[in-house]
Image (spheres, grey):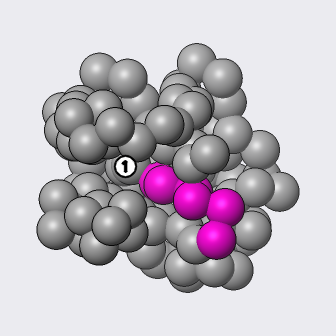
Amino acid sequence: MSTLYGIANCDTMKKARRWLEGHGVDYAFHDYRKQGIGEDRLRQWAAAVGWETLLNRRGTTWRKLPEAAREGIDEASAIRLMAEQPSLIKRPVLDTGEALYVGFDAERYAGIFS
């Protein structure tokens, strides 16, 4: 079974969940704002897709970080920040057990689950 990671009230998450449910895809949902997310898992994800792909630089949480934290960001500091502030993780993260996908795109999901 696939696991969808994200934040329940995020609009993109809602689209992804509607798509999965509408296409009869069984999945588990992990709200990493409520349930947390460990640095070990974030390191695994970073190894799979790259930490730059995981880091949400478009959200308000990123913009509220001190400039020094944003400018000096590297993999270790990004993982630490994402673990401390999960809203810094791009959403959704879909783990099919075979591959990891970051972000939602209906066409890509159709290809994954065809």
Q: Quadrant of the N terminus?
A: top right
Give the x, y percent position of residue 21. 30, 32
- The residue sitting at 16% across, 68% down in the picture is 107
Q: In front: 26, or 34?
A: 26
Q: In the image, is residue 59 above or below residue 33?
A: below
Give the x, y percent position of residue 67. 39, 60
Count of marks placed on residues: 1
Q: In front: 16, or 23?
A: 23
- The residue sitting at 52% across, 30% down in the picture is 29
Specify the quadrant of the image occupied by residue 55.
bottom left
Give the x, y percent position of residue 12. 21, 42
Query: Left or right: 63 with respect to 76?
Result: left
Q: Which residue is mark 1?
A: 91
Looking at this view, name the residue that lies furthest to the right: 40
- The residue sitting at 26% across, 57% down in the picture is 104
Q: In front: 102, or 113?
A: 113
Secondary structure category for the residue under label 1: loop
Instruction: Tell me if residue 17 can be seen.
Output: no
Residue 64 lies in the magenta stretch: no
Specify the quadrant of the image occupied by residue 78.
bottom right
Q: In the image, is residue 113 above or below residue 59?
A: below
Q: What crowding class fits label 1: few (fewer than 14 Cα within 10 Å), some (14-19), or many (20 or more)?
A: many
Q: Quadrant of the C terminus?
A: bottom left
- The magenta segment is 93-98
Query: Left or right: 109 with respect to 98?
Result: left
